[in-house]
Amino acid sequence: MIALDKLHSFIAYIQLEKNYSNLTIREYEKDIKQFIHFLEVEGVNNLNDVEYVHARLYVTNLYDEQLARTSISRKISSIRSFYKFLHREYNIRDDAFQSLYHPKKETKLPHFFYEEEMEKLFEGNKASDPLSIRNMAILELLYATGIRVSELTSIELRHIDSNYGVVRVMGKGRKERYVPVGDFALSAVEDYVLNSRTKLMKKTSHPYLFVNNRGEHLTTEGVRYILNGMMEKASMHSTIYPHMLRHTFATHLLNNGADLRSVQELLGHSHLSSTQVYTHVTKEHLRKTYMNAHPRA
């Protein structure tokens, strides 16, 4: 594979200097390796020989694969960053991708649960066995804080401060923030730690808050599996994924009068534009309410 040493140098750069998360680094590496493979197929054996025509052909191939515009946009950004690094460190020309068109993101509104749906989900999963207690703590904490599933699985016991009602989470780019936790979630977590976690841990030992049925550190895939099981138990047939609870958290806050800046800070968004999508959700909710309720709508 061409330029493997330069790719390794770039990965080391975004890991050590840019402090990107492991997930982001894997995505960069995957995108760039895919592009390098394309170059080899096209007979381009030197990164310095890449021209605009190659960049255009690569993007055309991505569209032919029927990838989402957001995925194509991310891949272009990955390669641009790679070439910017190559230009600075190895004086390799980086003009091929500079004028390349960036596809606009699709304007999809995030899916969320209505408040009555959340109540049904909570009510349908009340039980006193260790796994049910753990599952309730996971659901309460995701809904109460709006944290990402990767942030949830990274929480250690020492990161929960019951006295101040906050949890310390490590967000994207390894940015640390403190998120308030409501009484319902704190009680559920306390119940889990006292009456469930020790039973599940068995002979294992680690600092992470949430564990699987073997006492091992719970993974993000494990959380997805748990949430799907909770939906089935509550006899709810709609789709659920962890990020949907993050959308629900933000939407419910805005519906109940929270200001956008506060929601931005709670979600850990670097840019307000990332949070503004939820204002469109709340406006759409108001529009549907009006259309359904007004006699002459």
Image (tube, helix red, strand yellow):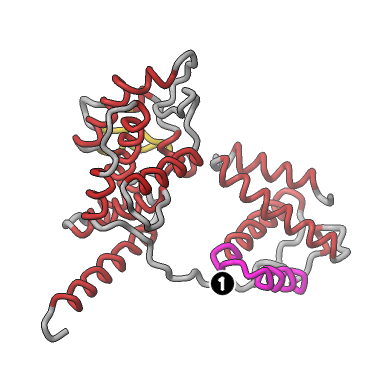
Which residue lies at the image location 26% right of the left edge and 50% below the top edge?
A: 118
Q: Quadrant of residue 273?
A: bottom left
Q: Is residue 243 above or below residue 276?
A: above
Q: Main secondary structure of the magenta part?
A: helix
Where does label 1 land, which residue? 103
Q: Quadrant of the C terminus?
A: bottom left
What kind of residue is marked 1?
Answer: Pro
Which residue lies at the image location 37% right of the left edge and 48% below the top edge?
A: 232
Point out residue 122 in the picture as x, y percentages from the top left corner: 26, 43
Q: Is residue 129 above or below residue 31?
A: above
In the image as oriented, which residue stretches furthest toward the top? 203
How dense is the environment of label 1, judged by Cα within 10 Å: few (below 14), some, or many (20 and up)?
some
Is 276 or 208 nearer to us in this picture?
208
Is 205 or 283 nearer to us in this picture?
205
Query: Which region shows up in magenta?
Result: 52-72
Point out residue 111 in the picture as x, y percentages from the top left corner: 37, 61
